[in-house]
Amino acid sequence: MPLLDVVRGVAIIGTLMTNVWIFTGPGAEWGVLSGGSPAGGAAGTGSSSGGGGSAQGGGPAWEWAGAWAEAVFRLVADGKFLSMLTILFGAGLAIQYRSAERHGRPWPGRYRWRALFLFVEGTLHFLLVFAWDVLMGYAVTAMLTAWLLARSARARRRVMAWAAGAHLTLMGLLTAGLVAYGGGNGTGAGSGGGGVPQEVVDLYAHGSWADQVAFRLENALVLRMEPVLTFGLLLFLFLLGVRLLRAGAFGSDGTGRRLRARMLRWGLGLGVPLNVACALGGEDWFLMGRYVAAPLVAVGYIGVIGAVVDRVRRPGPLTRGLTSLGRTALSGYVLQNVVCVLVSYGFGLGLAAELGGGGRGWDPWWVMGLWAAVSVLMLAGSALWLRRFSAGPVESVQRWALGLTENRSSGRGGSA
């Protein structure tokens, strides 16, 4: 199923479309909590939150163009590609279950080691690189999904319904609270922009790497709230990925094309109007936009990508690059975050402080340029890497670590 690799490559690049604003905004990772959301800064508000913002009402035309470009960029990306990546993770889990079943291996069996490795990997990524890591949440959700794969289809449908209902209820209650009591940003005397405390802005603009690691440790409970609050959504999307794969939605035959056409119509037909309505509603509707409307759009995006791939006669450089990135997705995800950290934060090049805000006129163009440059780096780098190696660097480390656990288990006479 070549489409899976292409869609996964698109999802990795698309995830960066959202995260790049976190790296370049005031207060970076903490700024998401103190200064609004990664999807903030709609053109209708007359301000741009990413990278400090420079588009002000009544400003030059190019400032308004920047504000609108940023708003569209964020609206296209926020939450959609993360949901797409989650669906694909569930589909990949279904493939591994099918492989274990075909070879007569116990399930979840050694997959438990794979999930544990992913959790450790995510923990290190969270502490050392990026506070908004998704791998830890994926690892926990994957273990529950793996257990459900050995249960009946009826049981999985029940869990999907429960997960969706619980998630929608929670998002609805939280949104009602934001609308009722106000969840907008506040800017006080001690803030460094968008309500972010000045000391936090200085930490990411000028602080050392060790100071930032210590900050993540001190605030780990708060910074790890997203996978907790969205666990119902993660579980639903994992199981949706399983269901789509088993229904043939990623196949190249007529069944796959028909299913993807339905995904396109329903996903975009329902998701886009709902997403636009949430964006127009303001920051108080951020949760509904990112965690309710965006997953619908993600389903439509998969349909769109499938329709485009179906029409490609001979894969060109872009298709080959996306396929390579999809096959090295874990390495690409880590690489894009490491590069953005080194480019944006004070212990690296510090461009977030140098180019962001201050009326210099670089916002938001340099942020979108950073996204484009890192995307090209990943596409070209993954293609070149796979010319010599069979898997990405992080994937190779994972295989090596899993091989060690299997060898030790075999040496003890047990089975992993």
Image (cartoon, rainbow, N blue to C red):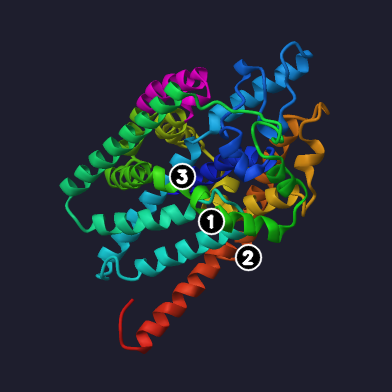
Overall secondary structure of the magenta section = helix
Disc 2 crowd rating (10 Å Cα; few below 14, some 14-19, many 20+) is few
Seen as rendered, the residue at the extreme top is 58
> What's the amino acid at mark 1?
Leu
Does residue 386 appear left or right of residue 409 in this picture?
right
Q: Which residue is mark 3?
A: 226
Q: What secondary structure is found at the residue carrying circle 3?
A: helix
Sequence-first disc among 3 and 1: 3
Q: CA distance from mark 3 to mark 2?
A: 38 Å
Is residue 316 visible to the viewer in this orientation of the structure?
A: no
Does residue 355 appear left or right of residue 214 in this picture?
right
The segment highlighted magenta reads 265-286
Q: Is residue 277 magenta?
A: yes
Is residue 90 visible to the viewer in this orientation of the structure?
A: yes
Does residue 207 appear left or right of residue 77 in this picture?
right
Q: Which residue is mark 1?
A: 330
Callout 1–callout 2 Cβ contact below 8 Å: no
Q: What mark, if any, has residue 23 been given in the picture? A: none
Q: What secondary structure is found at the residue carrying circle 2?
A: helix
Sequence-first disc among 3 and 2: 3
Which corner quadrant holds the C terminus?
Answer: bottom left
Quadrant in which residue 72 is drawn: top right
Callout 3–callout 2 Cβ contact below 8 Å: no
Does residue 241 appear left or right of residue 85 in this picture?
left
> What's the amino acid at mark 2?
Arg
Q: Which residue is mark 2?
A: 388
Sequence-first disc among 1 and 2: 1
Residue at 46% over, 79% down:
404
> What's the amino acid at mark 3?
Glu
Q: Position of residue 115 (x, y in %)?
A: 40, 63
